[in-house]
Amino acid sequence: MRSVVYLGVLSLVISVAGMACQPAKTGDALVTVGKESITQPDIDLLIKINPRLERRLNAPGGKKQIIDNYVEQSLMYQEARKQGLHNDPLVKAKIGLYDKVILAQSLLEERLEDATKEYYENNPKEFEKVKLAHIYIPYKVAGKNRALDKKAKVTRSEKQAKAIAEKVKAALDKNPADFEAQVAKVSEDARTQKRDGDLGWLTAEDARMKRWGWLSLVEKGFPTAQGKIVGPVQSENGFHILKIVESKKQDSFDEVKPRIRFKVQSQVKSALVKELKEKYPVTYAGEGEKKADAVEKAAASAQPAS
């Protein structure tokens, strides 16, 4: 939470502090604050610096909240310059520190952008998805109740469940339009029964499907054409009749960029820091003396006894 707040505050500091040295602005003013105007390009820059704010921008009243925050910063910025605080040694030191932070972050951002694109291009299957609906007939597994509804008691055998599933599939072969009706009548997945069996968009390693033992549904759904009804498909705890609501497609880079970025950022930063430490040696206070003492002791121990 602290890092999110820090990034938000830092973004405003960067944007507002830069107003004094920006060229003439283009675009109509969203609001005028003293001698300064805040325009749409200012808001766009703010979002570019801190993409997390985009969600707030799209929320009801979010843009007004961001602009109000910007206005507060602009008011204080103008008054601070009027009072000459920009000449204060401590303030200058802080600005110098922010300069280092911004440049360092820019280097990391550049590496992250490259790594994110590379990951997306090298792992296309991870971003493929298919939209499925199903009819679920569970069976008793190893003496345990594996139904999604923890209160339900599954007593039927695997053979009995398969027979029911085959009967449902035969009925749907004759009348595919009855799929939703069969969901309401037969399916024992309480989570999807009221949504016509809709499981939503699923990936090859979908966390829900993995948790419920249903990854075989995705495996079957990926190569199947849209609109087809297939099955019975066996999972770890039942049989399913599948409907391919929408066939396989791949998420765009922009859709998955935040997820990839979160996944690779720690590794990218560690690799960058390691690379830079080889380029710019880092020595902590006192380490030089310790190394010299160690070398001297090693040399002394290596000398033959007299």
Image (spheres, helix red, strand yellow):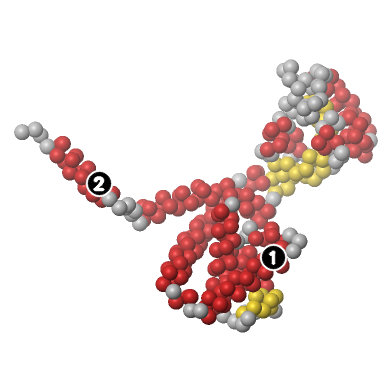
Question: Which quadrant of the rendered structure holds the C terminus?
Answer: top left
**Viewer-nearest residue: 13 or 209:** 13
Residue positioned 64% across, 44% down in the render? 126
Q: Where is residue 198 in the image (x, y as percent from the top left)?
A: 82, 40
**Viewer-nearest residue: 236 or 289:** 289
Sequence-wise, the earlier of marks 1 and 2 is 1
- Quick check: can you spot residue 21? no
Q: Dot 2 surroundings within 10 Å: few (below 14), some, or many (20 or more)?
A: few
Secondary element at tag 2: helix
Q: Where is residue 268 in the image (x, y as percent from the top left)?
A: 50, 50
In the rendered structure, which amino acid carries the disc numbered 2? Lys
Residue positioned 83% across, 33% down in the render? 190
Contact, mark 1 vs mark 2 (Cβ under 8 Å) = no
Above/below status of 181 relative to 166: below
Q: Which mark is residue 290?
A: 2
Q: How many labels does the image show?
A: 2
Q: Dot 1 surroundings within 10 Å: few (below 14), some, or many (20 or more)?
A: some
Relative to 138, 209 lies left or right: left
In the rendered structure, which amino acid carries the disc numbered 1? Gln
Residue positioned 73% across, 26% down in the render? 236
Q: Name the residue under label 1.
A: 65
Picture quadrant where residue 68 is located: bottom right
Badge nearest the viewer, 1 or 2: 1
**Viewer-nearest residue: 229 or 265:** 265
Q: Position of residue 214 (x, y in %)?
A: 73, 32
**Viewer-nearest residue: 156 or 80:** 80
Q: Position of residue 176 (x, y in %)?
A: 91, 37
Residue positioned 56% across, 53% down in the render? 2
